[in-house]
Image (cartoon, helix red, strand yellow):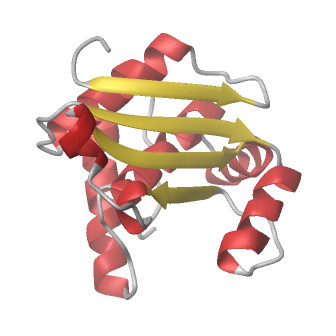
């Protein structure tokens, strides 16, 4: 592992974002969020069909969604992985590229910007953030805007902002 991040990428659909860029974004975000210990996460870019299957299996919603996050801290383990490996296992982020593409078009920004938005949302979930109410959602959206401001992106991603 180089540095503090072990990032596993699985592209079931081609990514408009280079692997090195994904790594750079996650490293910046983890630093911005104050994560100092070595950690591991995976990112999967996939189809609507695949994310629909996962959404049905894990959330009991038989429809595609934009992003799913499977936090390792929410899974049962007989011991802390970090105690054994010295690495904090964060979990998995799965993003539907077709849904991201449609959302980018509807929001008027590039697909790479939407993917960054969704990946940052997934990362926050892996770190324990949630949005069970409107106030929590607004706090999370503000944190996402701060994370996206910390990386090199052309233009702004306007999710969650009032017109």
In-image side of 90 versus 83 (left or right): right
Q: Which residue is drawn at 34% across and 52% down?
A: 144
Q: Which of 92 and 14 is in front in this view?
A: 92
Which image quarter is the C terminus in? bottom left
Q: Which residue is drawn at 52% across and 57% down?
A: 69
Q: Nearer the viewer, residue 95 or 104?
A: 95
Q: Nearer the viewer, residue 48 or 101?
A: 48
Q: Nearer the viewer, residue 121 or 54?
A: 54
Residue 56: name its quadrant: bottom right
Residue lying furthest right: 49
In-image side of 121 versus 16 (left or right): left
Residue 151 in sight: no
Which image quarter is the N terminus in? top left
Q: Position of residue 151 (x, y in %)?
A: 32, 27
Residue 15 in sight: yes
Q: Position of residue 2 (x, y in %)?
A: 28, 11
Q: Position of residue 103 (x, y in %)?
A: 68, 53
Q: Residue at x 66, y 77 (%)?
A: 59
């Amino acid at each position: 592992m180089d540095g503090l991040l072990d990032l596993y990428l699985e592209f079931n659909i081609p990514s408009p974002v280079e692997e090195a860029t994904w790594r750079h974004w996650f490293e910046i975000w983890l630093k911005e969020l104050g994560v100092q210990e070595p950690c591991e996460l995976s990112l999967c870019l996939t189809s609507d069909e695949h994310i629909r299957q996962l959404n049905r299996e894990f959330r009991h919603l038989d429809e595609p969604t934009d992003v799913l996050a499977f936090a390792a801290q929410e899974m049962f383990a007989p011991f802390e992985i970090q105690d054994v490996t010295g690495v904090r296992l964060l979990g998995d982020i799965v993003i539907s590229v077709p849904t991201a593409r449609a959302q980018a078009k509807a929001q008027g920004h590039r697909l790479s910007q939407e993917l960054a938005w969704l990946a940052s949302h997934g990362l926050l979930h892996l770190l324990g953030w949630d949005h069970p109410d409107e106030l929590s959602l607004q706090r999370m959206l503000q944190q996402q805007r701060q994370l996206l401001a910390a990386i090199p992106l052309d233009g702004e991603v306007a999710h969650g902002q009032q017109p």
